[in-house]
Amino acid sequence: MKNILLLAVTFLIFISTINFAQKEVPANQVVPLTIKVLALNKSLKGNIKIFVIGNDAIANELKKNIGNTIVAATISDVDAGNDIPSGKYEIVYVCNPSKVNAAKNYAKQNKSLTITNIPTLAFEGVTLGFGLDDDKKQIIFLNLTSSSEQGMEWNPAIMKVAQTIKN
């Protein structure tokens, strides 16, 4: 009986953690946070291209960073569309829930990093997710399973700022 009660309490805590971060992060807030967190990614090097699926506002904010260097990487191009890109992109920003599985397959094949501003998508396999709690505090989710599948290597400091997910 104690085990069932402990399991129920653990489940409720997990659900409340998910529920408080359900809010999408607007483009003008998520892009600066994305740039800061990308500095913790050791896998990104050289010129990197970013493709945004389903959110022109995020693409436009990211375009303001073309030419900026993030540790060993420089953002060289940002494109947007409503479907999976046909060319090679180092980062795929997934803003359309119906494209998660296709984006995961693309990222696994191309060793690309997937990112989203829709926090629930991190629980569906997008590697890096951003959300807002009820107090509008930003929350970072790191899906360790998809991160490994996508060949990402992170500075250990990310574990101090991100909530980790394994699925």
Image (spheres, rainbow, N blue to C red):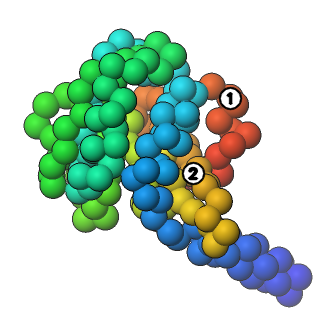
Residue 2: x %, y % from top left = 88, 82
Which label was assigned to residue 141?
2
| Residue nearer the viewer, 103 or 74 | 74
Q: As drawn, is 44 to the left or to the right of 95?
A: right
- The number of callouts visible is 2
Q: Earlier in the sequence, mark 1 or mark 2?
A: 2
Q: Amino acid at mark 2?
A: Phe
Q: Which picture quadrant has residue 5?
A: bottom right
Q: As drawn, is 122 to the left or to the right of 79?
A: right
Picture residue at 53% right of the left edge, 59% below the top: 131
Mark 1 and mark 2: span between their CA atoms? 14 Å
| Residue nearer the viewer, 129 or 110 | 129
Q: Which picture quadrant has residue 59?
A: top left
Classed neighbour count for the residue bearing mark 1: other residues with Cα under 10 Å, few (<14), some (14–19), many (≥20): few
Q: Amino acid at mark 1?
A: Pro
Q: Which residue is mark 1?
A: 156
- Quarter in which the N terminus is drawn: bottom right
| Residue nearer the viewer, 91 or 27 | 27
Which label was assigned to residue 114?
none
Spot the residue most to the right: 2
Picture residue at 43% right of the left edge, 29% below the top: 151
Q: As drawn, is 137 to the left or to the right of 8?
A: left
Spot the residue most to the bottom: 1
Q: Provide the secondary structure element on which disc 2 rests.
A: strand
67 up-or-down from 148: above or below: above
Picture residue at 56% right of the left edge, 46% below the top: 142
Residue 58: x %, y % from top left = 33, 49
Q: Provide the secondary structure element on which disc 1 rests.
A: loop
